[in-house]
Structure formats: structure tokens, C-alpha cells
Image (cartoon, rainbow, N blue to C red):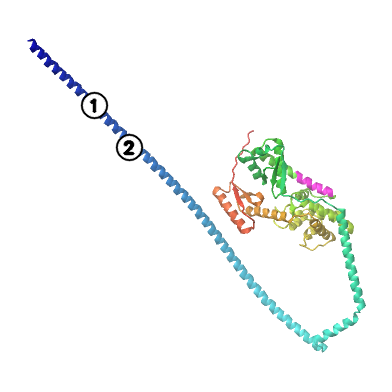
Amino acid sequence: MEILFSILLVVVGISTGFLIGYYVINTKMNNSTKKAEEIVEKAKKEAEKTKRDFLFELKEKINKAKLEAEKEIKEKKEDIKLSEDRLIQRENNLDKRDELFQKRELTLEEKEKKIIESQKDIQSEYAKIEELKQEELEQLTKIARLSKEEARKQVMKKVEESMTKEISIYIKEKEDEAKLEVDKKAKNLLAISMQRYAADIANEQTVTVVSLPDDELKGRIIGREGRNIRTIEAITGVDLIIDDTPEAVVLSSFDPLRREIARVTLETLLKDGRIHPTRIEELYDKVSKDMKQKIIDYGNDALFELGITKVDPNLIEIIGKLHFRTSYGQNALEHSKEVAHLSGLIASELGENVILAKRAGLLHDIGKAIDHEVEGSHVEIGVDIAKKFNENDIVINSIASHHGDQEAKSTIAIIVAIADALSASRPGARNDSLENYIKRLEQLENVANEIEGIEKTYAVQAGRELRVIVKPEEVDDLGAHKIARDVKEKIESTMQYPGTIKVTVIRETRAQEEAK
């Protein structure tokens, strides 16, 4: 029984162990299956997520590429439109030129027809005159019973008989003596006048040097990112040259008035110490207003020096403006005063009215004070100014005749012309190259001023750059580009110049309020 019981216990233990093992193995298999399913599920989710991310990224790239393509297409369309506008503009310009040439051709044809008709009329009249002359000769020959040649010989013979050799010699001697005496007296008169008046020779330059107390101020003048120097150059129209020269800044401009205003403005800024765009504009406006009084002072000083009185205040201001004009490098006011002094000295030697001669000499070039503001030559402008202020007829004629445009009607007018030639021809008085340089810069500015929409123009960098300031309310950004192109084309077609000229168009809008 014990053996049987032991066997049963063994069987029960084996069975129990088998069942427990089966249960454990089954549980592990279930857990493994569950984990495998979880891993598969997780892998599926990650695959889905990766797929979604990839599709999203792909869509973004497609959208980005699409936007870039649209932007590029838009830019190409704008470039094409600009090119079309340029072509249309050029085509219009060509049409206008063609129309102009056609009109000129028609005008020339009409003039040619008129000239041909006039020539025919002249030839016809000439033929009639020749016929009349021939008829008269024939009648004279019949009356005198002499031919033309015989009559001429008889007249010449009588003349030769009537004039003796002694009379001919006497006349010749007297003529030579008179010529020598006149030349001697004229040279003596001019020499005495020039000796009595001696002025320093001073040529106008195109640069002004402003001394600095310290080289560190150069950095403040330039300002952050160059804003201060750009503001000074823009509002004054003067080019600032800041180089390695110690404690000095050079102002360069062909216009002495601009240079003087820029010099005073810069020196005031250096004394004030506050150097920024707003302060620069404030001081420039103040200096420009003060300059008017300075111009009047120049005019009054010139009148006081010459002893001339009873001059209209407005005319005094115009006389003062001559200080800031040049003629072949010669200061126009100094030249006018010199001509006035010489005219007075020559007039005193000849017994003419000295004060009137000085007045005519001072005003002979008065037109140069505003010839850059008014159309016409300085002679025509000067005559108009003299008439406007009711000057003496002798003064008006002296202005009109000092370059030979009109006939001199008085001795004083001739004296002024002589004094003008003396002042201009003395050694060192004039500089031809400077005058040509100034004329070229003025022409460069005037070329741009003729285009609509332009407010101001400044020739800088010795004429190598033209800065054009447009009216922002009339010209937009595209219009500014068009104006730059028009100015360039006009310069190329109307001017001759060395090297290249850079055209810079500036369009600026400012909003300003004042807090009170």
C-alpha cells in the first residue's frame, strides 16, 4: 500500500508539475504574442507618422517651390514690362525726332524755294540794271562823242596835272605826324591811368579750405554711416573732401556763393559742437538768410569805395551778388570795381564826368549777377536792369556797347570798353580754363533742370557726378529711374565731356511736425 501510495504521489506530482509547466509555458507564449502584437502596432503607428511627416514635408517643399516660381515669374513679368516701357519710350522719342526732322525738312524746302525765287528776282533786277547802265553809257558816248576809255583817260590826265609832287609829300608827312601824335597821346593816357590805379591780382579758385581744431572732428563731420557728410553735401550742393591733410577739410564747388554758405555753415557747426542732420539744416537756413545782408554789405562797400550815391536798394543787392560770380576766373565785383576806377581815371584825363564814368564802369557787367537765373546774354540782362532802375542813357549805352554789340554813342561808353579790356588783359587777371570748367558745370546742371519733375540739381566731384533732387509728390520711384535715364541720354546727346558722368536721382519724402 505504501508503494502504491508512493506511486500515486509520484504520478500526482508529475501531473501537477506537467500542468504547472504547461500553464507557465502557455502564459509566456500569450505574453510573447501580446508583446509582438504591441510591437507590430507600434511599428504601424510609427510608419503612419513617418508617412504623414514625409507627406507634410513634401507638400511644404512643393508650396515653397511653387511660391518661388510665382515670384520669379512675377519678377520676370516686371522686367519685361520695364523693358516694354523703355522700348515704347524710345519708340516715342524716335517718332518725335522723325516728326521734327520732317518739319525741319519742310521748312528747309520752303526756305530753299524762297531763296531760289529771290535769286531769280535779283538776277532779273540785275539784268535790268545792266541794261540801264548800258543805255546810259551809250547816251553819254553820243553826247560827249567819246568812248568810256577815252573819257577816263582825259579825267586822269587832268587830275595828275593838278596835283603836284610837293603837295603829295606834304600831305603824307602830316598824316604820319598825326598818327604818331595820336598813338603817343593814347598810350600816355592809358599808362597814366594804369599807374594811378593798381590792384592786387587774385584768381578765384574752386575750393575752400576749412581749418579744424582737431582731427577727431573729421569723424563727427562724416557721422554715423556718413549721414552728416551726405546731409551737408545734399543741402549745400558742395562736395566735401576729407583726406589725410591734417586738421583741414576741403569744400569743392564751381559756385563761390554755395562754397561760402557751406564754409560758414561748417564753421558754425564746429563752434556749436552739435553735428547732426537736423542741426545742419537749421544752420544752413540761418546762414542762407544772413548771406542776403552780407551781399547788401558787399554792394554798399563797393559804392562807398567808388564814391557813388543815389542807388536803388534793390540794385545794391544785385551789385553785391557780383562778388559771388566769376568771369574767366576773375571775381566779377572786383573786375567791375577795377573797370569803374580805370574809367574814372581816364575820364578825368579827358575832362569827362568822372562820377558818371565810374557808375557806368561799375554797372557794365551787372547782368552777370543774375545771368544764371534769367534767359539771355549778360549784356541784354544788364541793359534791362539799368532801364528798370532808370539809369542814365549814357550808362545804358555803355552796358550795351562794351562788347561791341551796339555802337558807342558817347565818350564815356568808349572809355568803359577800354577800361574793361585793360582790366581783363592785365597779367594774371583771368584764367580761361577755369571759366570753361565753370561753363561746363553750369551747362551740366541746366541740362537736368529742363526736365519736368526736377527740383534741384548739383554738379559735384568736379563734374564727374550729377545729383538730381526730384519733387516726391510729382515723381514716384519708377519715375525717378526714368528721369535718371532721360538725364543720361540728354547729357550724351547735347554735351561733350571727358570720361564718364554718374547721374544720381534722389527722391525723399519728409514728414515734420513741431511740438509746442
**Disc assigned to residue 363:** none
Residue 468 x/y as whole percent: 62, 49
Up-down relation of residue 330 to residue 96 (above or below)? above
Q: Residue furthest front?
A: 3
Depth order, front residue of 504/226 = 226
Closer to the observer: label 1 or label 2?
1
- Image quarter (top left, top right, bottom left or bottom right) of the C terminus: top right
Residue 327 x/y as whole percent: 75, 54
Please say whether residue 472 is one of the residues in the magenta stretch.
Answer: no
Identify the residue shown where x is 90% and y is 73%: 171
The reply to whether callout 1 and callout 2 are in contact (CB within 8 Å) is no
Please say whether residue 295 is one of the residues in the magenta stretch.
Answer: yes
Q: Is residue 356 visible?
A: no
Q: Which residues are magenta?
A: 293-305
Q: Which residue is denoted by mark 2 in the rendering? A: 51
**Disc assigned to residue 32:** 1
